[in-house]
């Protein structure tokens, strides 16, 4: 019996027939379809697929992918071992459409073969598809979503045939093993229709733990690596023998400021040297240290995991910064922007993407957390980096269980994500969270997060957008400062790098927060202050009418529809909420600057501050901002107390701030008299 063409050696396939009139090598395949009722060309599959970058699938960079697609299509139609063989007409039409979308996405995000499409990548594809549907129409139907998501499941299901034909296959099932239909159902009916941000309680704990890790714990890990590399193994014991174990086990971990015990127990508690426990534990520590830095970069910049994985390592001798980081002056020259460059598409030689990952006042020595984390990653993996074979910033160190000096390899997205999950489960204290949290849209189930399993790295993008919109007073001051800088970079400087999709994420999160706030107001249980408070209170009945008798996700959907239709937008800041989309003519920041609110359709950021907003009719404050106003009250009360007989301009400013803070706090029911002034 003659072998099926896709099972022949690659060179031999080219001259074999795939249908009555097409050869494997042809740029178009005319599959044999029953023509009755179909137009001519109904079975035609054109391999000259536009990859979105000026190339087509027939061009040189895509040789491997083209061959994989041909094997896939052939086996879909012909392979008798494959369950549910497809009709040629279906393959040439519906499947072809799905495949084209996937291929263009792969090209855009730097994937050039199926083996790179792990579960993490599939969730990126999911977000990309959802994004497209949301942009195209307000309503996302499960069926239309499933059609697009299905392609990855089909490729995975055909792994056996692909493998037999020498194609590199997907390493695992897409969407964490969930069927595309279920994934689509959930997405289409989910209240927010998107991948949600991490809940505050989860994100704040993780970011705090990451920030702690890039300090002294990372110094300890680097010292351990140096120690490990300084020990000369005995000739018979290899890299993980007794001298090494003894040296590593004797390392004493640091005691962090404010704590009484070392942050980590000594390595190799077991005395059984045969298993090289200390070396294994060190490897885990290295991976956890890398995960802490990776999560910090993603959480404070909104970078995708694929973009993070594509960063290159090495230090620029001139700037002392990682080679992938550049500093540029902002438009006004008052600030300096930290830009990170990543070669997202491996095939687009020289094409770099840029993101803003931090900002500082010009001339200051401040290093943003994301840049610090990249510096740490650079140092952490430098022993395993090789400019030619392993140039990546993040690496899988040489050696399988214990560390060796062999060159590392770039990890898959799945490995980076797995390490993050393990770090989250081990160090972030999520197990202390309650099982459920009450939210304006119902109850939030935190049980999945408590084990680290519910955490997904692609949620960082939305989480980042959330914190750029509003800084949370529960954040560590250093992280809070960073988000304030990032908000300025994106709003006042108008700079987001060349990643406009990030703006979509920010808009999406803004809409989610707007809806959540209005739902709270509809329930009438929250107290608000500020110029807009009366209007919001007056319109509570209107908000209740919008929701009607709906509850939970249904109530959310109704309110979301109302918000989208009416283009109701709220701008969130640490000091309060701006409703200028409702009454642009009252925008005080614009009247001061003599700019046109109708044209700009957003606050005039250069003039937006607590004093200006406090006197604006578009402004409202609720319980979310109490900490800001308390702190402002205390700080300025301290200025008044220290002024003595001095009644200069500074005194009057502080006096006005105290008056304004006191008024807002009293309206919100906060006991002002019991507050101490800051020393
Ligand atoms: S002054 Fe503040 S509240 Fe008023 S429109 Fe400007 S940003 Fe919004």
Image: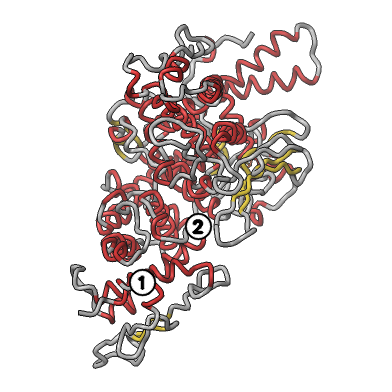
Residue 149, picture quadrant: bottom left
Image point (45%, 17%), residue name: 243
Tell me, yes or no, if residue 582 can be seen here: yes
Cβ at disc 2 under 8 Å from ligand 1: no
Quarter of image, ligand 1: top right
Image point (69%, 53%), residue name: 596
Rendered location of residue 69, percent (x, y): 38, 70
What residue does disc 2 label?
Answer: 109
Image point (63%, 21%), residue name: 659
Above or below for 374 versus 129: above
- Secondary element at tag 2: loop
- Secondary element at tag 1: loop
Relative horizontal placement of residue 504, taking residue 145 as reference (left or right): right
Residue 279, picture quadrant: top left
* Mark 1 and mark 2: Cα distance apart in space: 30 Å
What residue does disc 1 label?
Answer: 9
The residue furthest front is 235
Query: Which badge, 1 or 2, comes first in the chain's sequence?
Result: 1
Q: 56 and 434: which one is in front?
A: 56
| Mark 2 surroundings within 10 Å by alpha-carbon count, few (fewer than 14), some (14 through 19), many (20 or more) | some
Q: 631 and 357: which one is in front?
A: 357
Tell me, yes or no, if residue 205 can be seen here: no
Q: Which mark is residue 462?
A: none
Rendered location of residue 151, percent (x, y): 33, 64
């Amino acid at each position: 019996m003659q072998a099926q063409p896709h099972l022949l050696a690659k060179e031999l396939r080219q001259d074999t027939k795939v249908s009555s009139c097409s050869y494997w090598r042809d740029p178009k395949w005319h599959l044999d379809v029953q023509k009755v009722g179909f137009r001519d060309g109904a079975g035609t599959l054109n391999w000259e697929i536009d990859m979105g970058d000026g190339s087509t699938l027939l061009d040189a960079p895509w040789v491997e992918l083209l061959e994989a697609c041909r094997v896939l299509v052939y086996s879909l139609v012909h392979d008798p071992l494959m369950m549910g063989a497809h009709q040629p007409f279906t393959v040439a039409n519906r499947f072809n459409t799905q495949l084209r979308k996937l291929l263009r996405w792969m090209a855009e995000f730097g994937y050039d073969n199926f083996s790179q499409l792990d579960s993490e990548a599939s969730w990126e594809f999911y977000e990309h598809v959802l994004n497209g549907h949301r942009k195209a129409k307000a309503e996302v139907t499960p069926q239309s979503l499933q059609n697009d998501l299905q392609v990855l499941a089909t490729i995975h299901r055909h792994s056996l045939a692909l493998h037999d034909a020498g194609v590199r296959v997907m390493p695992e099932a897409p969407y964490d093993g969930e069927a595309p239909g279920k994934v689509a159902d959930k997405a289409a009916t989910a209240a927010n229709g998107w991948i949600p941000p991490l809940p505050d309680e989860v994100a704040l704990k993780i970011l705090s733990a990451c920030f702690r890790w890039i300090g002294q714990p990372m110094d300890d890990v680097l010292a351990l690596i140096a120690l490990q590399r300084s020990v000369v193994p005995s000739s018979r014991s290899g890299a993980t023998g007794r001298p090494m174990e003894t040296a590593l086990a004797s390392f004493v971990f640091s005691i962090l400021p404010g704590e009484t015990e070392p942050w980590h127990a000594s390595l190799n508690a077991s005395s059984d040297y045969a298993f090289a426990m200390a070396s294994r534990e060190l490897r885990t520590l290295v991976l956890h240290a890398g995960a802490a830095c990776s999560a910090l970069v993603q959480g404070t910049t909104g970078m995708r995991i694929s973009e993070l994985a594509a960063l290159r390592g090495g230090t620029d001798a001139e700037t002392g910064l990682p080679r992938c980081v550049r500093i540029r002056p902002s438009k006004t020259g008052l600030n300096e922007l930290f830009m990170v460059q990543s070669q997202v598409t491996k095939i687009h030689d020289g094409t770099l993407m840029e993101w803003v990952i931090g900002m500082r006042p010009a001339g200051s020595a401040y290093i943003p957390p994301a840049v610090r984390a990249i510096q740490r990653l650079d140092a952490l993996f430098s022993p395993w980096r090789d400019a030619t074979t392993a140039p990546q910033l993040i690496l899988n160190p040489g050696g399988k269980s214990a560390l060796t000096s062999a060159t590392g390899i770039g990890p898959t997205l799945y490995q980076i994500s797995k390490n993050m999950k393990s770090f989250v489960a081990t160090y972030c204290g999520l197990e202390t969270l309650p099982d459920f949290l009450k939210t304006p849209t119902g109850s939030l189930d935190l049980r999945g997060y408590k084990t680290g399993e519910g955490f997904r790295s692609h949620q960082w993008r939305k989480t980042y957008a959330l914190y750029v919109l509003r800084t949370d007073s529960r954040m560590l001051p250093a992280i809070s400062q960073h988000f304030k800088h990032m908000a300025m970079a994106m709003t006042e400087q108008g700079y987001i790098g060349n990643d406009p999709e990030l703006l979509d994420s920010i808009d999406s999160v803004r809409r989610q927060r707007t809806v959540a706030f209005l739902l709270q107001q509809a329930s009438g249980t929250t107290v608000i202050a500020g110029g807009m408070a009366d209007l919001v209170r007056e319109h509570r009945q209107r908000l209740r009418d919008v929701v009607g008798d709906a509850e939970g996700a249904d109530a959310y959907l109704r309110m979301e529809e109302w918000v989208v239709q009416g283009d109701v937008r709220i701008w969130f800041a640490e000091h309060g909420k701006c409703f200028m989309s409702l009454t642009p003519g009252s925008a005080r920041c614009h009247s001061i600057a003599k700019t046109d609110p109708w044209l700009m359709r957003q606050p005039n950021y250069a003039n937006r501050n607590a004093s200006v907003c406090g006197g604006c009719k578009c402004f409202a404050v609720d319980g979310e901002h109490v900490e800001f106003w308390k702190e402002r009250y205390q700080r300025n009360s301290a200025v008044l107390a220290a002024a003595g007989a001095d009644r200069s301009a500074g005194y009057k400013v502080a006096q006005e701030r105290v008056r304004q803070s006191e008024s807002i706090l009293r309206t919100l029911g906060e006991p002002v008299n019991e507050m101490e002034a800051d020393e």
